[in-house]
Image (tube, grey):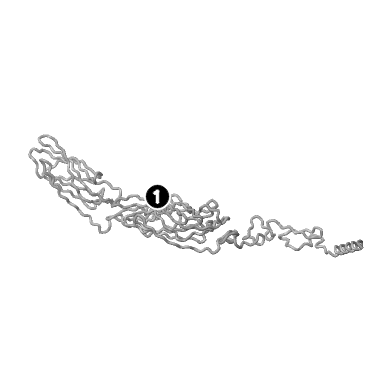
Amino acid sequence: MRSKVFLLVCILLVVLVACTKAECKKTEDCVGKPKSTFTASCEEKKCVYKPIPGVVGNGVCDSGENKCSHPQDCGQCSGKVPQSQFLSYKCTEQKLCVEEVSGAKPVFAAAEASMSGDKFKVDFSYNMPFNMKKDLFTVTFTLSQSPQNRDERLVRAELIGTTKDKRTITVLREDINRYLWTSGSSVTHDFILDFPTVELEGELSNLVLSIDFEYVLLQGSKRVPKQGSFKVNVKDKLVFVKPGASYSCPSSCDDKNLGTRDTCSAQTGFFCRHEPIPNACGNYQCDQTETKCSCAQDCGPCQGSAGNFLDFTCRGNQCVTILKPGTSVQPNSLFDDRNFGPVQLNNNFKFNNPFTVGKDELQIDLKIYKSDPSVSRVVVETVRVLDGQQQLADASPNQELSSSASTVSVSIPGIVEYEEDHNLIVGVWYMYVQNDQEKRGNFQKPLGKVTLIRPE
């Protein structure tokens, strides 16, 4: 019985082998896949297909191919990123498959701060969720300038926040170095948020932006450099993502500013950078070759008031000062009766207010009104113009006086600012001879508040 069963099985196997049709007899019979993408061969009556390397459609994701450039070989760039709430796979314009935020929306917020008499309006703009590998945290500063402040410069910024586990971290620390020249002027700065985190996604709260700035304080006619700082709160939380993959550079980094060199590379994290070009207008620095008239954006505008009596204006490429239209120069004359022992003088101090340094002169008419017969000579040796202990000008006329008026003139050579208010005092040092003996002394005459100006 067993022998019969074994014989039957053998017969069936022989029949099955005999009935199985060969897939091919020669290579030309193998036409199941395109010859443009596969090589074919007939091996043991079966077709064997091998992909041609580097050919699109060969079913292999070769070097130089990816899911966006060749989905037929590499698969589709789509779907959610594992363990992510906000990230999905998407193709970029550069045909790269990256982890991109799905459903990001722009957030706009505003805050105000006051410091040293100035008011700052701060506007924030950023995406939520915020992609740390791609997005920018944009801040616009607008100045409401106080009357006594000038040349406000934003120096640096620092943004801190609180993580979910209650740690306070620095989100950004960056120099700005941009001027807010006049009231109403604005500066927009794009910040790159870069802080260490191993989280694919996270959240920051209690965001505080701190700004250090410099300015010039006008104290009367004096310009005093000052420093200040202010802080503003960002009301919304910052939900962020930090994908593992890098992005490519934008198609253009042109900031429309000829004063900056616009670059992007792997070294910059594929963010656009705008490096100031030395000696170029628009580099945010007032270089030696630039003036307020040739490059107002770097040096500030040549306009408006330079004080109570002067205005700024351009003359060629130079910013100069001129008298305000309708300015009236008031001549002053102060009488002084001076008695020192055996001599009595009648003096008259004449000066303009405002007083143009380098041009106007302080004139003093001096004459002997009375003198003792024992006095043979009276000489004015030195005249000094003072403001407190500061000497502004002097002269050494060594001029002998008589009963007729003698005039002594003193000019003030220069001042630091365009306008300076001074409480002027004139000091007169004299010598007289009495009974053949020389005697010396001095007296002072306050002139009151006088504005010194230097129009150009």
Residue 97 in picture, x, y percent from top left: 60, 59
Image position of 204 (left or right of 431): right
- Residue 274 seen by the camera: no
Give the quadrant of residue 120: bottom left
Check the image and name the residue furthest to the left: 373
User: Residue 9, located in which quarter of the rendered image?
Assistant: bottom right
Horizontal placement of 329 versus 285: left or right?
A: left
Between residue 143 and residue 263, name the one nearer to us.
143
Q: How many marks?
A: 1
* Corner quadrant of residue 119: bottom left
Query: With respect to residue 106, does 452 lie above or below?
Result: above
Classify 10 Å Cα crowding around label 1: few (below 14), some (14-19), many (20 and above). Answer: few
Residue 163 visible at all: yes
Q: Is residue 119 left or right of residue 136?
A: left
Tell which residue pokes out farthest to the top in this image: 436
Q: What residue appears at the point 11 percent right and 42 percent down from the top-left corner? A: 343
- The image position of residue 405, as x and y in percent, is 13, 46
Indicate whether 390 appears above or below 96. Answer: above
Coordinates of residue 325 in the picture (x, y in percent)? 27, 58
Mark 1, residue position = 289
The N terminus - image quarter: bottom right
Which amino acid type corresponds to the residue marked 1 in the rendered image? Thr
The correct choice, above or below, for 112 with respect to 396 in the image is below
Q: Is residue 114 left or right of residue 161?
A: left
**Quick one: 111 or 223, which is closer to the camera?**
111
As rendered, which of 236 and 76 lies closer to the eye? 236
Mark 1 residue element: loop
Spot occupied by residue 307 in the image (x, y as percentages of width and height): 29, 55
